[in-house]
Image (tube, rainbow, N blue to C red):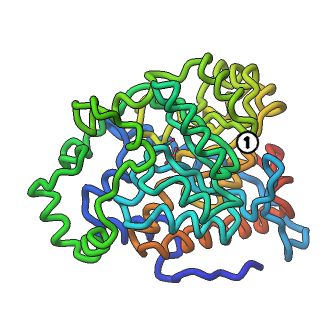
Amino acid sequence: MSAVNYDPRYPSVFDLKQKAKKQIPSFAFDYVDGGIDDEKGKQRNRNAFHDIELIPRYLTDVSSVDISTEIFGKHYAIPFGVPPIGLGNMMWPGAEAALAQACQKSSIPYILSTFSTTQLEEIAQIAPDVCWFQLYMPNDIEVMKDIIRRVKCAGFNALVITLDIPVGAKRNREIKNGLKLPFRLTPNIIWQSIIHPVWAIQTLRHGQPDFVNVLPYRKDTDNDGLAQFITSFTQHGVTPERLKMVRELWDGPLILKGIQCKKDAKLAIRHGIDGIIVSNHGGRQLDAAPSSVDSLRQLPESAHKNLTIMLDSGIRTGLDVVRAKALGAQMGFSGRSFFYGMGALGTGGANQVIEIFRDEITRSLQQLGCLSFSKMDSSWINQ
Ligand SMILES: Cc1cc2nc3c(=O)[nH]c(=O)nc-3n(C[C@H](O)[C@H](O)[C@H](O)COP(=O)(O)O)c2cc1C
């Protein structure tokens, strides 16, 4: 049996979420927790996991199970990682460096966002064995080339291109909270900071979070303000031509994130992509999008044969990671879980979330009578 090494007051991601909601300002909580429109897509992601039933096989000695996985020639201790989260240090100051540290220690992937608030070079030093970089495709080809050069130089292990933000999202909670770029101290934000002094003091100590990885590309002639610069930074829809260019510039593992349709999966194979993350951005972009689980079910056989398949959007338990594996995903990611953890417990929350998942994945496999994560497949599903 695995040793459980977490704060027993918060044994699940749900418990961390409840605590985070009280602990941090509502604008920071809503930024992470919110979805788009009616937030039905976010709920659909969860429901789809609940609907996957797995049939246990007893009469097996399960005293030892192997939950490690190997992808892109690297060994990871747990088949679970941190997906890219922009503005990570706003939810909890120092979150990105703490996450990178926790992932390196536990040997799980950490994907740094283009719109992160810590220098990519610093993260690569903290997590040399497990850091991946997520690219929002810049409009400017020279900027794209420079970022890829920096990512390569820093030693990132994989490059992830996000496809599912052809346009910025209109998220109602953020609009109502007055969350704008650059941050303005509105009466609501000031009040929220006063009533959450621990968060406010930590934030003052760390300084205001900024888009440090892309700000160097802001030209003196960009007079339209930070918000406009960030909005116009990325392409409105990643084009196949750009994929071709990136494939020529980057010879390491190349991953597309946000795949939801068969045609895109087939295009990925044609462009020499190594892996995909099936994702609907956690229900933050299109409320009508299918759940990530349904998108995974729809992938063509050729995707399973030719691509390393991973999944995020809706994962909240170790059992969900096992369920995703039963459908063919080698690795699961969960964005909000980690930020609920940090919102609840500060930077120590990263380890708490990893331990919760390590324990739940192990116990789920033991309960199912499956001795190795790599052996979990569709034969366990109650069809
Ligand atoms: C607050 C927040 C910021 C995010 N920022 C990014 C980002 O910068 N780049 C990206 O590719 N995905 C981003 N995502 C999407 C996550 O990488 C991931 O797809 C999503 O969180 C998965 O859903 P889950 O939170 O339900 O696990 C963000 C998600 C959240 C919640």
Q: Residue furthest left?
A: 187
- Percent of width and height locating residue 17: 41, 65
Q: Quadrant of the N terminus?
A: bottom right
Q: Residue furthest right?
A: 60
Left or right of residue 339, residue 290 in this image: right
Count of marks placed on residues: 1
| Nearest to the observer: residue 236 or residue 301 | 236
In the figure, residue 258 lies in which quadrant?
A: top right
- Percent of width and height locating residue 104: 65, 66
Residue shown at the point (63%, 63%) measured from the top left: 127
Residue shown at the point (76%, 26%) measured from the top left: 272
- Percent of width and height locating residue 61: 90, 73
Left or right of residue 220, residue 53 in this image: right
| Nearest to the observer: residue 55 or residue 151 | 151
Q: Is mark 1 within 8 Å of ligand 1?
A: no
| Nearest to the observer: residue 261 or residue 116 | 116
Left or right of residue 343, residue 349 in this image: right
Q: Is the residue 215 above or below the residue 2 in the image? A: above
- Of the residues shown, which amino acid type is indicated by label 1? Leu
Q: Quadrant of the C terminus?
A: top right
In the figure, residue 66 lies in which quadrant?
A: bottom right
Q: Is the residue 162 above or below the residue 153 in the image? A: above
Left or right of residue 303, residue 213 in this image: left
Q: Is the residue 343 above or below the residue 29 in the image? A: below
Secondary structure under badge 1?
loop
| Structural crowding at the residue carrying mark 1, measured as other residues with C-alpha within 10 Å and reported as few (<14), some (14–19) or many (≥20) | many
Q: Is the residue 336 above or below the residue 195 in the image? A: above
- Percent of width and height locating residue 28: 30, 57
| Nearest to the observer: residue 183 or residue 341 | 183
Residue shown at the point (52%, 82%) measured from the top left: 7
Is residue 46 at least partly visible in the picture?
A: no
Q: Which residue is mark 1?
A: 327
